[in-house]
Amino acid sequence: MKVLGLACAAAAHGLSATRRGVLLAPVLAPVAAAAAEQPMTTASDIGSYAALTGESSTPMGVGTMAGKSRPVTGCVLVEAPRSAGATVSADLVLRGGSVATVAFDAPGLKLAKGFYYDVEARDKLGDSSYVQVVKGGGGASGAAIADAVLRRDGRYGAFGPPTNVKVVSDGGAAPRVVEIAFSAITPGGTETPRRAAVAVAAAPGSDDAVVLVSSASETRWKGGGDALARTVSSTFRVEATRATKLAVGPASDYRYEERGGLRLPDIANPLDGFSTEPGFGSSGSIGGKGPPLGGGGWPPG
């Protein structure tokens, strides 16, 4: 700016181009020299996040939330999950017109809350146990259970489908437990070996299987994670079932409206019920049975 001001002042006083050059030379020379000493930076010269921003990046592992889509677990919740002492329980809408109350005991784990979770307990070491509903999985093989848990849109498929999948064991009763080994893909594209114990429980009145996935990294698994996973898995149970008219779908979940869904009045006569007041009209009512708007496919179908 100072250089531009000097140039304008020289021109205003009617100095010739030659005389202006002589006047401005002592000022322009250092500027030109500094520019010559500082090479231009191009995209090929930027080799790291720090080089681009001047800040250090935060490492991301398979459990990092950043960039993750919400996993599909098949859970349609009648109400919020409950936690009493070490016991976690929840009411799930299942196919076949039933609601199942499932529960498990998770000493040392805490009920996880927030948009990302359905029914899950976690600790700071990375141990976790979460509930998943497997459509038509009542009599599924161990391999089929593993495929359902490790779906591309599931908990461990956010950055790519899990690899190196192996059913380690499958057995037991009340509940049956399927142990699987696999590698989850991290945001950086590397593979992280993990292990999981999947407890499988049947719900009377439905062909769905309700499973509890207790998982940890392979390193943690060898350091006590396996014992915790087996302990939690052994307590998984369906405590009760009851008949319901709720269908498995987004509008049946208690969180539906909180996440942008809209329940319309249940109108039997399409020519009636146009009042904005729910009590008006012979068939207009607010019952949550009308066709849903919004929701974006949440939760799973």
Image (spheres, grey):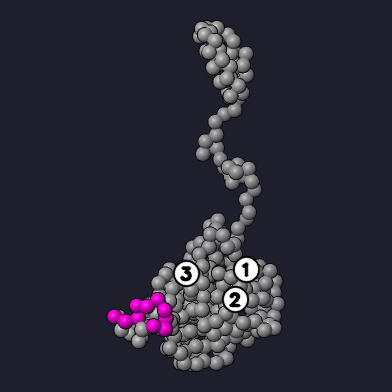
Earlier residue among tags 1 and 3: 1
Badge 3 density bin: few <14, some 14–19, many ≥20, Cα 10 Å: few
Towards the viewer: 124 or 100: 100
Which quadrant would residue 233 be assigned to in this image? bottom right
| Kind of residue at badge 2 | Glu
Q: Find residue 217 and name its label.
A: 1
Q: Amino acid at mark 3?
A: Gly
> Looking at the image, which residue is at 30% across and 80% down?
270
Quarter of the figure that contains the C terminus: bottom left
- Secondary structure type for disc 1: strand
Query: Looking at the picture, how far across and down is residue 28, in whole percent?
Result: 59, 17
Rendered location of residue 100, percent (x, y): 52, 88
Q: CA distance from mark 1 to mark 3?
A: 35 Å
| Camera-side residue of 201 and 298 | 298
Residue 92: in magenta span: no
Q: Are marks 2 and 1 in contact (CB under 8 Å)?
A: no
Q: CA distance from mark 2 to mark 1?
A: 17 Å
Task: Name the N-terminal-most of marks 2 and 1.
Answer: 2
Q: Nearer the viewer, mark 1 or mark 3?
A: 3
Range of magenta residues: 271-280
Tag of residue 260: 3
Q: Specify the principal SS of the magenta part.
A: loop
Q: Is residue 32 above or below residue 285?
A: above
Q: Is residue 17 left or right of residue 84?
A: left
Q: Nearer the viewer, mark 3 or mark 2?
A: 3
**C-alpha span from label 3 to label 2:** 23 Å
Question: Based on the displayed image, in which of its 4 quarters is residue 296 positioned?
Answer: bottom left
* Residue 103 visible in the picture: yes
Q: Do the CB atoms of the residues marked 3 and 2 lie less than 8 Å apart?
A: no
